[in-house]
Image (cartoon, rainbow, N blue to C red):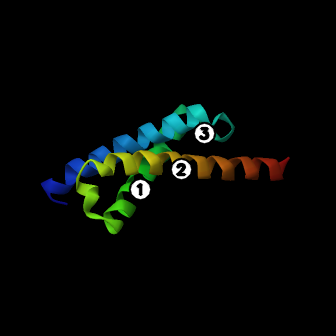
Amino acid sequence: MDSSTILPNIISLISGGVGGYTAGALLKKFSLGPIGNTIVGLRGGGVGQQLLAHLTSAATTGGSGMAANVGGAIWMAILGAIKNAAATKTR
């Protein structure tokens, strides 16, 4: 990893964490707790940024933050839904 990719990756991780945290606060049914939402959002942010990088060259501009934010929120909601489904089956 060279210095030109470090900043976009840091932005995507932070944006993903914020997206996961925000989605958890808004979608209480799928929330994994504040720390869980943030951690899952970090990973979702990385995935969102990588998807954007494959689809367009915007990943090195301001678009990476928004893609990471949305990716973090989506990933948190998906894992929250899976957690809820698993909890429902075990009851």
Look at 47% across and 43% down and name the residue there: 39
Q: Is residue 7 above or below residue 35?
A: below
* Front position in the image: 69 or 58: 58
Q: Is residue 35 visible?
A: no
Q: Is residue 61 visible?
A: yes
Q: Earlier in the sequence, mark 3 or mark 1?
A: 3
Is the Cβ of the residue at disc 2 closer than 8 Å to that at disc 1?
A: yes
- In the picture, the quarter occupied by the N terminus is bottom left
User: Secondary structure beneath disc 3?
Assistant: loop
Q: Residue furthest bottom?
A: 54
Separation of disc 3 and disc 1 at Cα? 19 Å
Residue tagged 2: 74
Q: Residue furthest right?
A: 91
Residue tagged 3: 32
Residue 91, given in percent of the width and then of the height, sits at: 86, 46
Instruction: Name the residue type under label 2.
Output: Ile
Please state which of the two labelled residues, at mark 3 or mark 1, is closer to the viewer: 1
Name the quadrant containing residue 27: top right
Residue 34, given in percent of the width and then of the height, sits at: 53, 32
Look at 34% across and 68% down and name the residue there: 54
Residue 49, given in percent of the width and then of the height, sits at: 36, 56
- Per the rendering, the mark at residue 48 is 1
User: Secondary structure beneath disc 2?
Assistant: helix
Please state which of the two labelled residues, at mark 2 or mark 3, is closer to the viewer: 2
